[in-house]
Amino acid sequence: MFRIKNELGTIKISSEVVTSIVGRCVNDFEELKLSNRSGSIAGLFGQKKLSRGVKVVINEDKVEIDLYITINYGSPFASLANRIQKTVTDDLEEMTGLIVSEVNIHIEDIDPPVDSQNKAEDN
């Protein structure tokens, strides 16, 4: 839970809300999908789709984000990761007022090209 105090009172933002916002940002990218977090059994059982592959740690007024993704074959890793980092940071800071200190991208897998998927299905 994150608390923002101001002259009018306190605003409380749960980590689940932050995770959902991040998940929605990442789902807008067609070149990737969120993975189950490495080593996380929770990712296999009952975890919501938007939170799967997203880890959020809130420290005081800063947020650290780890994203575990599968990218489409042929997608440029570096430029895609940079776009994700910028989009997530901008959207989260604008919506919540939280300061994003890190957005770490973990590329866990690559989806094969569509042509090779079609060939595998034909066999």
Image (tube, rainbow, N blue to C red):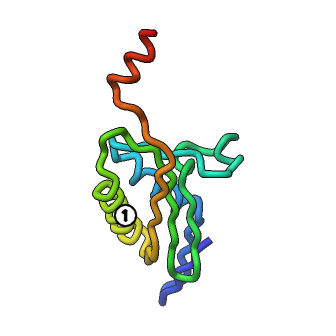
**What residue do we see at 47% from left, 65% from top?**
104
Residue found at the far bottom of this picture:
7
Could you say where residue 30 lies in the image, as x and y percent from the top left? 33, 41
What quarter of the picture does the N terminus occupy? Answer: bottom right
Is 73 or 4 nearer to us in this picture?
Answer: 73
Q: Is residue 82 visible?
A: yes
Is 72 or 119 nearer to us in this picture?
Answer: 119
**To which quarter of the image does residue 92 belong?**
bottom left
What quarter of the picture does the C terminus occupy? Answer: top left
How many marks can you see?
A: 1
Could you say where residue 76 lies in the image, as x and y percent from the top left? 29, 50
**What residue do we see at 64% from left, 46% from top?**
43
**To which quarter of the image does residue 88 belong?**
bottom left
Of helix, strand and loop, which one carries label 1? helix
Residue position for label 1: 85
**What residue do we see at 49% from left, 85% from top?**
8
Label 1 neighbour load within 10 Å: few <14, some 14-19, many 20+: some
Is 45 or 15 nearer to us in this picture?
Answer: 45
**What residue do we see at 54% from left, 51% from top?**
53
Amino acid at the residue labelled 1: Gln
Relative to 65, is 45 above or below? above
Is 19 positioned to the left or the right of 42 in the image? left
Could you say where residue 87 lies in the image, as x and y percent from the top left? 33, 61
Could you say where residue 100 lies in the image, as x and y percent from the top left? 44, 74
Q: Is residue 98 visible?
A: no
Relative to 25, is 10 above or below? below
